Amino acid sequence: MASNLSIKCMNTERPTICTSIQEEAQGMVIERMKELANHPRVNLAEIWLDRVKDLNIAELLKDKPLPVLCVNKKPIDKGNFRGSDEELVNQLLLAAKFGAEYIAIPNYLNRNVYPFVRSTINNLKESTHRNISLIIEEHNWTDTPDWMSLEVKVLEMIIKGADVVKLALTPHNIEDVERVNLLSGVLLKQMIRHILISRGELGRSTRITTPLQGGEFMFAPTEIKGATAGGQLTVDELDAAWNNKMAVEIVKEY
């Protein structure tokens, strides 16, 4: 089922843009949220909780000026969180309780964690009448798996309770990039909410194309120095690409 935040393929409006915040001081995170809320093309802020040294989640999200995705990344995913799996998800569930529209957890946690997270989110949605979405994500820093392996990954995340499946993959050739685009088209047809990214300069085009194929949103910094991954386009670059009718026509080939 599609999120009410996401703007779907071939709509006259452009897809949703998410900008990351990685400040170490909570006050700076709050100020950055205010800046992004005033940006004409930023719809969502990704807050890296693991970076905030004076973290108080209730205070951080109390008066948030725009929708947020909260993440809590371990060093394997370029983050700073060094606690247990249970501590990682408990912080994120606290963020969901205090207003986060999305939380994201990695696909490699202890399997017992996922039913707990799913049931807690379901209870929160019922008690608060808010739309809270669970993203389960996997970052492959070395490869893009074959087609069957990608299908298995998607199914695994859905079984674990994902509302949105996220795969960030590393391409070695154009075939790897095309496989990501093809998967996005398949997931759109199956009404599976997704975020698919092929990393680096080689996969740069997927940041334009997969949101046009129903992707939930795409990450983009307001300035290139704020990029959190190789191959990211800035908000202005991404928006300009989506305003290019030729780019939209290319997506129809998939």
Image (cartoon, rainbow, N blue to C red):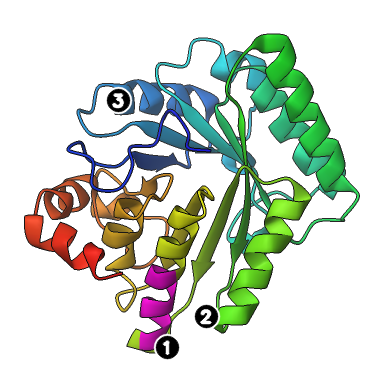
Q: Amino acid at mark 1?
A: His
Considering only vertical position in the picture, is 112 above or below 107? above
Residue at the image position 56 percent from the left and 84 percent from the top: 146
Q: Nearer the viewer, residue 193 or 70?
A: 193
Using the image, tell me which numbered label, if any, was put on residue 172: 1
Residues under numbered marks 2 and 1 in contact, where contact means CB atoms less than 8 Å apart: yes
Residue 115, percent from left and from top: 85, 42
CA separation, marks 3 and 1?
37 Å
Give the mark nearest the N terminus, 2 or 1.
2
Q: Magenta region: which residues? A: 175-182
Was residue 87 drawn as part of the magenta stretch in this picture?
A: no
Q: Nearer the viewer, residue 134 or 87?
A: 134
Using the image, tell me which numbered label, if any, was put on residue 144: 2
CA separation, marks 3 and 2?
35 Å
Query: Which quarter of the picture shows residue 147?
Result: bottom right
Give the mark nearest the N terminus, 3 or 1.
3
